[in-house]
Image (cartoon, rainbow, N blue to C red):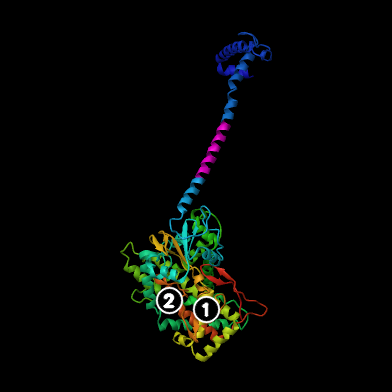
Amino acid sequence: YLRDRQGQKLGNGGSLLGTNGNRLGKQERARRASGPDRAAWAGPGCCQGRGKPGTGRLRLRAQRASWRPAFPSAMDSVGAALWAGCHLRTLLLGAVVFLLLANFLKRRRPKNYPPGPPGLPLFGNFFLLDFGNSHVEIQPYVKKYGNLLSLDFGKMHTVTISGLALIKEVLVNQSEKFVDRPVMPLRERFFKTNGLVMSNGQVWKDQRRFTLTTLRNFGLGKKTLEERIQEEAHFLTQEIEKEKAQPFDPHFKINNAVSNIICSVTFGERFEYQDHHFQELLRLLDEVVYLETSFWCQLYNVIPRIMDFLPGPHQKIFNYWGKLKLFVAHVIENHKRDWDPDKPRDFIDAYLKEIEKHRSNATSSFNEEGLIFCTLDLFFAGTETTSTTLRWALLYMALNPDIQEKVHAEIDTVLSQSLQPSTSLRDSMPYTNAVIHEVQRMGNIVPLNVPRVVKADTTLAGYHLPKGTTIITNLTALHTDPKVWATPDKFNPEHFLENGQFKKNESFLPFSAGKRVCLGEQLARTELFIFFTSLMQKFTFRPPDNEQLSLKFRMGLTIAPVTYRIC
């Protein structure tokens, strides 16, 4: 069949093949005549000449001979593939080695750089600490390596500063060198360069200056805003009275009350405690606070381009921030409908006027995006820290009935049951004031402060700090220093008392210090005093029967107590 098909296909080529086959036969006979395989190659037609019956078989042999290179060719392809695979593996291995070497050289500490534990390639010390307890786990390394401790988290090089003298050097004495915030990929993706908390340079200066001026115009530090806080404290006590001495969770009642103060200044309105939409926003804010310092979100800061494509809890935070942004944008749109630039009602109205003022300046940071993110920062900062401190306060009172009794006694002496709490009476209530400060110290709301970044190469305590190094100020060590506090791990208002009078302590920095000191410190102090005193004036808090209260906490942007109930 093959012979016939080849003959039909090639025509005269068939006879040529036969001729070639005959020629091959002669060559093979000559070679094998003297070889050991002579007998093996003898067979019918093997020696027949041209035109003889055996020619077809010889032609087939010639065809087979012409195919023989096909098998080695396939083997060559397999070998080439294996060889290419080896080359690919070598290239990949080389690339990995190169990246590790480049990372090592990049992370190699410069001369006189602060000491710290060794880290892993690419990740540095990322897996060294539990992010749910980092403020505690970092302390042994501070003791081992000193008051300047270096840790690397991916590409971010950090130095943790401990001790009052060094912290003040960074925050106050050399504040201009450390005034900026580091760029965090997680925040940068959503906030970009906007807002009050993480912005830098001229943007931060302009936004902070405008915000402080505007808040003062709307009552910050004045009697009018204090009266608003007193009114909200009254609403809060009414809300708690509805529980009729039954166990309840004070979390979102307190959040709602505190948030209403900043909302009245920024949005021009307060929200009822039964407003389900606003309660949902407060829960979103609570989740954002918790998620932002979680393992997955911190891993995003190390490898953002990879984490963008991976599922996980870190993806939720962008969704939550988006919902909060929509809420603020909706409030702004409502303001625009009846906005009168000559009669600003609140922060948003004043900011809209500032936008119009800078409309022709393309580089101005006063735009609608700036308004949204400044308002979000005010909403967050004006709600979270103060409400969390008050939740710690009620928990410590329920756990320390003897201290709560002393607070009640002082309130009964100064205020009785009829006089409304006021900051004008704070100096007459040293014990209550000391209790509030001790709550802040023990609650340790922002344990490692908000980070800073080195603006230019500088020297601190003899160590070289390169430009771009992230600076962490260790407030936890400051607030638990046994050289400063008599009983650092125990709730003790006597830390802030001397001869029965309130005594300040310079190692107490819950609002930070220097140019980046908390913008709302004055408002927060007023809120803490009036809300706490109003609650103590009306109620005695205790643990529910058969329930044990705990000082366990949940780590986020702030340290908050785990959910608890009191009655």
**Between 431 and 376, the one nearer to me in the picture:** 431
Rendered position, 191 above or below 23: below
Q: Where residue 85 sits in the image (x, y, percent)?
A: 55, 38
Q: Nearer the viewer, mark 1 or mark 2?
A: 1
Tell whether 116 sits left or right of 203.
right
What's under tag 1, amino acid-wise?
Answer: Glu
Judging from the image, what secondary structure is the residue with disc 1 in? helix
* Span highlighted in magenta in the image: 77-95
**Between 29 and 195, the one nearer to me in the picture:** 29
Q: Where residue 175 sits in the image (x, y, percent)?
A: 39, 68
**Between 428 and 500, the one nearer to me in the picture:** 500
Rendered position, 109 above or below 265: above
421 in magenta = no
Q: Residues within 10 Å of mark 2 (few under 14, many from 20)?
A: many
89 in magenta = yes
What's under tag 2, amino acid-wise?
Answer: Val
Rendered position, 87 above or below 29: below
**Between 189 and 491, the one nearer to me in the picture:** 491
Q: Residues within 10 Å of mark 1 (few under 14, many from 20)?
A: many
Q: Where residue 402 sits in the image (x, y, percent)?
A: 59, 84
Query: Main SS of the magenta segment?
Result: helix
Label placed on residue 265: 2
Q: Which quadrant would residue 451 be assigned to in this image?
A: bottom left
The residue tagged 1 is 438
Q: Which quadrant would residue 194 be assigned to in this image?
A: bottom left
